[in-house]
């Protein structure tokens, strides 16, 4: 997700308790979103009728990507929309359903075994990345420009992969690395504090949750694609 934050203002959080409440709220929203997405994906993966329907109507995933891009555009240029109830939760629900549609359309292309191997691998990687982001002595929140450039490289690789399938493994691998970096940066922005150059505002808990949730989902999708390419 495209987020553009300038240098951190010193008074985003009044005290440590406010920060803990913010972090708990963000993580709870992310957990609920991931649970909903996983339940929808599982019900589709083990339902042959749903699998055939999504394989036939693959464009549903494309529509989901379009909705995600549109909402991400709103986040970048109209973040205040996500600070107003109930508009923020309505947009969040649409955002989650769009991701669920993309995940389901991707998952039905693979054997359920690969899907859950990718899911377990993603969960393990996320845990390690969260621990790294929390205890690493380095601040990565000021590295958005470098990650943006890397994202452009991945996007170009994706376009090349359409015409040269042999580079898909490299594309999927770079995609995994890219979203690992996104996860670390967004986790540190959620944690905030004096050791981090940038952080989310206290009222941006929906945006923070959406960013983390999207990072986790697309990390899973790239892992699934990578495992599908190397599966023998």
Image (cartoon, rainbow, N blue to C red):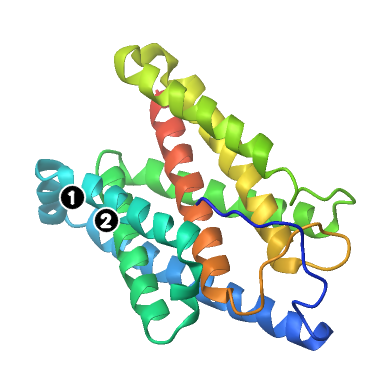
Q: Mark 2 to mark 1: distance in Å?
A: 7 Å
- Residue at 85% over, 52% down: 136
Where, by quadrant of the figure, is residue 24 drawn?
A: bottom right
As displayed, is residue 57 above or below residue 83? above
Q: Quadrant of the C terminus?
A: top left
Q: Which mark is residue 101?
A: 2
User: Does dot 2 land on a helix, a strand or a loop?
Assistant: helix
On the picture, is 143 further left or further right than 103?
right
Where, by quadrant of the figure, is residue 74 drawn?
A: bottom left
**Of 175 and 90, the residue lying toward us:** 90
Q: Which mark is residue 118?
A: none
Contact (Cβ within 8 Å) of mark 2 with mark 1: yes
The answer to whether any part of residue 189 appears in the image is yes
Residue 206 percent coordinates (x, y): 51, 73
Q: Residues within 10 Å of mark 1 (few under 14, many from 20)?
A: some
Residue 192 percent coordinates (x, y): 77, 67
Residue 148 percent coordinates (x, y): 59, 37
On the picture, is 23 further left or further right than 60?
right
| Residue hosting label 1 | 60
- Residue at 57% over, 43% down: 179
As displayed, is residue 98 above or below residue 116? below
Q: Residues within 10 Å of mark 2 (few under 14, many from 20)?
A: many
- Residue at 24% over, 47% down: 61
**Of 151 and 12, the residue lying toward us:** 12
Instruction: Tell me which label, 2 or 1, sits earlier in the chain.
Output: 1
User: Does dot 1 land on a helix, a strand or a loop?
Assistant: helix
On the picture, is 103 further left or further right than 207?
left
């Amino acid at each position: 997700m495209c987020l553009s934050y300038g240098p951190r203002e010193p008074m985003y959080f009044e005290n440590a308790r406010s920060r803990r409440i913010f972090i708990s709220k963000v993580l709870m929203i992310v957990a609920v979103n991931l649970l909903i997405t996983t339940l929808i994906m599982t019900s589709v993966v083990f339902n042959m009728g749903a699998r055939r329907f999504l394989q036939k109507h693959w464009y549903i995933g494309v529509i989901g990507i379009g909705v995600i891009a549109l909402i991400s555009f709103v986040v970048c240029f109209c973040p205040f929309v996500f600070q107003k109830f109930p508009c923020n939760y309505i947009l969040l629900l649409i955002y989650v359903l769009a991701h669920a549609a993309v995940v389901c359309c991707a998952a039905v292309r693979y054997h359920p075994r690969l899907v859950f191997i990718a899911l377990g691998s993603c969960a393990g990687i996320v845990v390690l990345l969260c621990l790294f982001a929390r205890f690493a002595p380095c601040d990565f929140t000021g590295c958005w420009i470098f990650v943006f450039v890397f994202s452009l490289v991945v996007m170009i690789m994706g376009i090349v992969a359409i015409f040269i399938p042999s580079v898909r493994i490299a594309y999927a691998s770079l995609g995994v690395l890219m979203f690992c970096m996104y996860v670390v940066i967004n986790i540190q922005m959620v944690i905030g504090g004096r050791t981090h150059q940038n952080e989310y505002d206290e009222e941006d808990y929906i945006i923070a949750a959406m960013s983390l949730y999207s990072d986790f989902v697309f990390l899973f999708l790239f892992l699934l694609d990578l495992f599908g390419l190397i599966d023998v």
